[in-house]
Amino acid sequence: MIRNFAVLLLLLGLAGIFIHLMQGYIPATELNQSAHYYAAHSAEDLGAANIVTAIIVTYRGLDTLGEVTVLFLAATIIGMVLANGHKAQRSLQRQLPPSGELLTTASRLLTPLILLFGAYVFVNGHLTPGGGFQGGAILASAALLLLLTDPLKRFSHRLIAVVESLSGLLFIAIGVLGMVLAGGFLDSRILPTGAFGTLFSAGSIPLIYSLIGLKVGAEFTSMLNNLAETEKS
Amino acid sequence: MNTLLLVIALLLAAAMLGAAWVSIRVHRVATAMLAAGLVSLFASVMFLLLAAPDVAMTEAAIGSGLTTFLFFFVLGRVRGGRDD
């Protein structure tokens, strides 16, 4: 009774707050100052056709570095927590029912295509919507499909660790290089901006986004791998 | 935003609320997971309508794809395993 009353009170309070916010809402008719700067200058400054990518990788590059770090910490902590649990023991493994013919055949066909699509998404991040985070998640979903097909499949920890740390290091190195060769940390103009709208343009943005894609994909894959390893199966 | 887009957006919002309600109330776990994935899918279409294709892609890849698959993966492990 008292719990229901508390929930009702909370809902009413939230509704009050939202109604208040709704009444004070005035739709913006023009871009604010920084948004206007980004919209007007990112094409000629950085040569990136996708303004969102220009903002994420260059203007707000430090935030992206922070996001990647948070994801790295999450993957590390999952690894730490799950490593203390019961490790899979080969003798205790039970026989799993075989995955269906449909799933096996479809995953053989789809896995390369999904990997290719993920790579396409992060390589073309400066031209089309999408980028490192999306591409990395698509890469990891290919790994997940493999795990669904064969639950006992394991990915090499060493390979994941090498890909993950190498791309992280290179990301930082490119950032520091920006400080030496161009305007500041993570400035993408260390390479020529090239012709607007082509694959090799926008300075180091495609390079950085590919590294982020590989890093995110490796992190998600390591999380899945750790999850798959803990259970006794 | 013209009238057609507004109607589609309202329908999407209603469908999202409906799917969310289903995912909370339904008793079968698999159905609840599918409904939760459906909420993300509708949300990604909504982001597309609001002219944010980058966010829509993230939502579709992580919220709708990876999370739903992960739920099913874990469900399969939990169902098949013995109780500790």
Image (spheres, coloured by chain):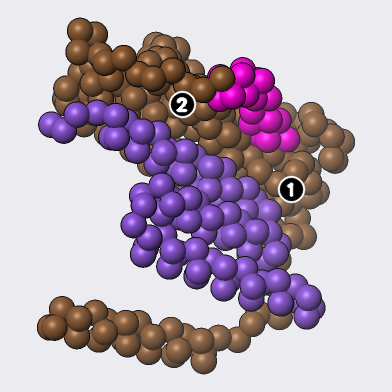
Chain colours: A brown, B purple
Q: From where the camera sits, is residue A178 visible?
A: no
What is the span of residues highlighted in magenta in the rendered image?
A102-124
Q: From where the camera sits, is residue A50 visible?
A: yes
Residue A173: x percent and y percent? 52, 25
Tag in front: 2 or 1:
2
Please, which chain is the residue tagged with disc 1 on?
A: A
Residue A196: x percent and y percent? 85, 40
User: For the point 75% across and 73% down, which residue is it?
Assistant: B5
Q: What's the amino acid at mark 2?
A: Leu
A38 w.r.t. A164: above or below? below
Q: Which mark is residue A50?
A: 1
Q: Contact (CB < 8 A) between labels 2 and 1?
A: no
Residue A107: x percent and y percent? 59, 22
Q: What's the amino acid at mark 1?
A: Asn
Q: Which mark is residue A148?
A: 2
> Which residue sits furthest top?
A91
Mark 2 falls on what kind of element?
Answer: helix
User: For the point 35% across and 18% down, which residue is it?
Assistant: A96
User: For the point 17% across and 26% down, which residue is it?
Assistant: A85
Q: Nearer the viewer, residue A113 or A68?
A: A113
Q: Nearer the viewer, residue A56 or B4?
A: B4
| Image quarter of residue A95 | top left
